[in-house]
Amino acid sequence: MRAIHLTYFVHSRGFALIMGLLVLALSYVFFSQGDFAAIAGDHGFALPSANEWITGPGANALASLAANALVVAGMALCGKLYNVLRTMTMLPVSLFLALQIATPDLFLLFYTGTALCVLVLACQLLLYSCYRAPDRTRRVFLIFTLLSLASATQYCYLVYIPVFLLGCAQMRIFNGRTLVAALLGIITPWWMLFGFGIISPDDLHMPDFVSIFSEIDFNDTLLLLVTLGLTVLLAVASFVLNVLKTIAYNARIRAYNGFFAILTLATVIAMCADYRNIISYVPLLNYCAAYQIAHYFTAHRADRSYVAVLSVVGVYLVLCLCQTVISI
């Protein structure tokens, strides 16, 4: 098979399907060992955080797999509807799956990180649909309603309220009506929670700031930090290398890519500042990094670029195997 054909293959649905099946197989192997991450504490202001929603390792793992499937479907839909990468490719999906399985204990855990990734992707699709359409204030209202409601379960959602405000500016829809819709969206969930008696003022509390590093051993901590460090490095390097290519795009594609850049930067900064809660940002970091890396390989699609793509995937699969061996 010629090199160019292999390069086309890693961008295809077939490669994404292979990655999906491989990830499921590795997940089953890791799950069968019975070594699961445990996240203790209620990290919300009023409602239980996502780590307390589902009990039982089996149901929790299935919920996580379903949530990751939603992310994969959302990524494919984003590419089809908005053509952010200016070409039809499934490489972002393949890379996302590889990055996710590098931390199999988190991949099989339904917690705030999983829910955050699903919610931000849904809000991103809503935001993109508002490009140069400032009259679509209902969608803006819905975005900030979802983020505000979710913040009752975990404080990390608050990070993305200013991110989506900047996103409104990127989509050329930031005006007085949009700002009012955003403010009403932030207020409405709390008004309804108190108004319907779902919560009372006595239920309000500060989150439990429990560091994940106090709950996992040294080897797991080291592997987690190595994996996250590599992901951040690849994401930032890919973004920098993509800048000159992005400048040549039309205004709509530049706006979409500009929001991705803001989202990636905000996630990296949040992970550094909120390091005790770092795992809550891991799936979203993987989502942003998968896009940035895929953007680079799409914009620089040389005949033998498949070698670099397979090398990146291979490194993350090795990291997954290291975690699996350590847990035995």
Image (cartoon, helix red, strand yellow):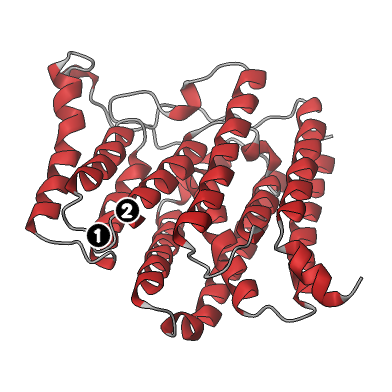
Q: CA distance from mark 1 to mark 2?
A: 7 Å
Instruction: Say whether residue 13 is visible.
Output: yes
Amino acid on which disc 2 is placed: Leu
Q: Looking at this view, is 289 or 15 the one in front?
A: 15
Mark 1 is surrounded, within 10 Å at the Cα level, by few (under 14), some (14 to 19) or many (20 or more) other residues, namely many
For residue 127, which numbered disc appears in the image?
Answer: 2
Q: Residue furthest top?
A: 197
Which residue is at 76% across, 29% downward? 31
Numbered marks: total: 2
Q: Looking at this view, is 96 or 140 the one in front?
A: 140
Q: Position of residue 324 (x, y in %)?
A: 80, 41
Of the 4 image quadrants, the one containing the N terminus is bottom right
Of the 4 image quadrants, the one containing the C terminus is top right
Query: For numbered disc 1, what is the local secondary structure?
Result: helix
Which residue is at 59% across, 35% downward? 215
Amino acid on which disc 1 is placed: Cys
Which residue is at 39% across, 50% downward? 125
Instruction: Say whether residue 282 is visible.
Output: no
Left or right: residue 168 compared with residue 98: left
Q: Position of residue 188 (x, y in %)?
A: 16, 32
Residue 109 against residue 118 in the figure, above or below:
above
Disc nearer the start of the sequence (1/2): 2
Q: Position of residue 27 (x, y in %)?
A: 75, 36
* Residue 110 in which image quadrant: top right
Q: Residue furthest right?
A: 1
Residue placed under numbered mark 1 in the picture = 168
Q: Position of residue 248 (x, y in %)?
A: 44, 85
Residues at circles 1 and 2 in contact by the CB criterion of under 8 Å:
yes
Residue 217 against residue 125 in the figure, above or below:
above
